[in-house]
Image: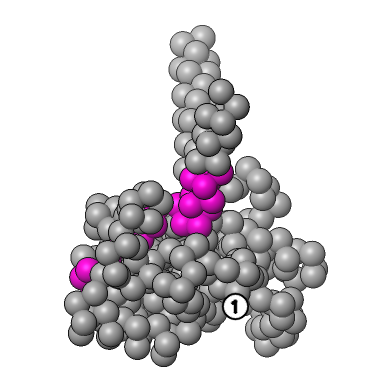
Amino acid sequence: MHNKLAFLLCVLVALYASMTFSAESEAQFPGRDLYREVPTYSLDDLYKKLDAVVVVDARSQYEFETLHIKGAINMPVSDKDFDGRLQALRAKTDKPIVFYCNGVTCHKSYQAVRRAIYLKLVNTYAYDAGIFAWAKAHPEKSVLLGNSPIRQSDIIDKDTFNAHLLSPKEFGNEVANSGIVLDVRDRFQRDGIGFFPGIERRVALDQTTKLDKILRIAKNEKKTLLIYDEAGSQVQWLQYRLINAGVTNYYFMKGGAKAYYDMLDENKAKRASRQSN
């Protein structure tokens, strides 16, 4: 009887541990609940099998060129020819294809596998811990701005990024101080005119030659760079290029163009409320 109770207790403990681990996994990887059909690789899985799989970066070319897993190939899931490139890759190899993107809040790796499933391509996975987790764990297997191995200290932390953020209102006020304003949204995100017509310059992040020229001008003329993107996330990748170029006087708009639109709408609502009163 005692043995049966002990066995039952062990089973219950194991079941509780399994349920706890599952709950923690769902909390750590919220995208898995949205893409339940997508099989995943853990960080350890990918490291152990790195030489036996094909690693594909599903992000933009600019993000890839900034920081990527050593040996990975770039195949942006947003490109029109993604399906064709993926089918061509599968025709060349029967190795597992493992997609990755920025991290647990990025869904591009899941979306890439979902496309593969739709195309009836098997043996595809998402490494959903993302590039930052990889670079911190395996700097010797990472490439930053063309250099490898990298140092963990090369990865920009949140405090360093946040130190260069301005609210949309602060950003707008700073424009009056004769800095260089850059709209780095791509052409699909831009409206007919920018927020600061006649002042700002438009340059997409993948226009590296044009972008590097502006960075040199800002550095040589000691001008403040004021930069905004669509939602405040793309500029994180630009910060690596700024640091590499020796540019120190720069700020990003917190929340990007979307936050600026929200501020304009809020101001409009306040004016309408005052007029109605």
Residue 49 seen by the camera: no
Q: Residue at x 53, y 36 (%)?
A: 271
For this rendering, which residue is in front, 144 or 139? 144
Tell me: residue 214, above or below residue 122.
Answer: below
What are the residue bounds of the magenta stretch? 246-266
Q: To which residue does mark 1 refer?
A: 75
Q: Image quarter for residue 149?
A: bottom left
Instruction: Please give left or right for residue 126 compared with residue 242 in the image.
Output: right
Q: Quadrant of residue 225?
A: bottom left
Of 117 and 276, the residue lying toward us: 276
Give the farthest residue toward the top.
1
Does residue 28 appear anywhere in the picture?
yes
Where is residue 248 shown, x and y percent of the image? Answer: 21, 70
The kind of residue tagged 1 is Met
Residue 222 lies within the magenta run: no
Q: How is the image coloured?
A: one colour
- Of residue 164 and residue 80, the one placed in the foreground of this image is 164
Q: Is residue 257 magenta?
A: yes
Determine the image quadrant of residue 132. Answer: bottom left
**Picture residue at 25% right of the left edge, 54% below the top:** 163
Front residue of 36 and 203: 203
Q: Secondary structure at mark 1?
A: loop
Q: Judge left or right: residue 81 versus residue 165.
A: right
Instruction: Please state the horizontal and vertical placement of residue 48, each as a whole percent of the image.
Output: 43, 67
Q: Could you classify mark 1 by the number of other residues whose Cα lies within 10 Å: few (under 14), some (14-19), or many (20 or more)?
A: many
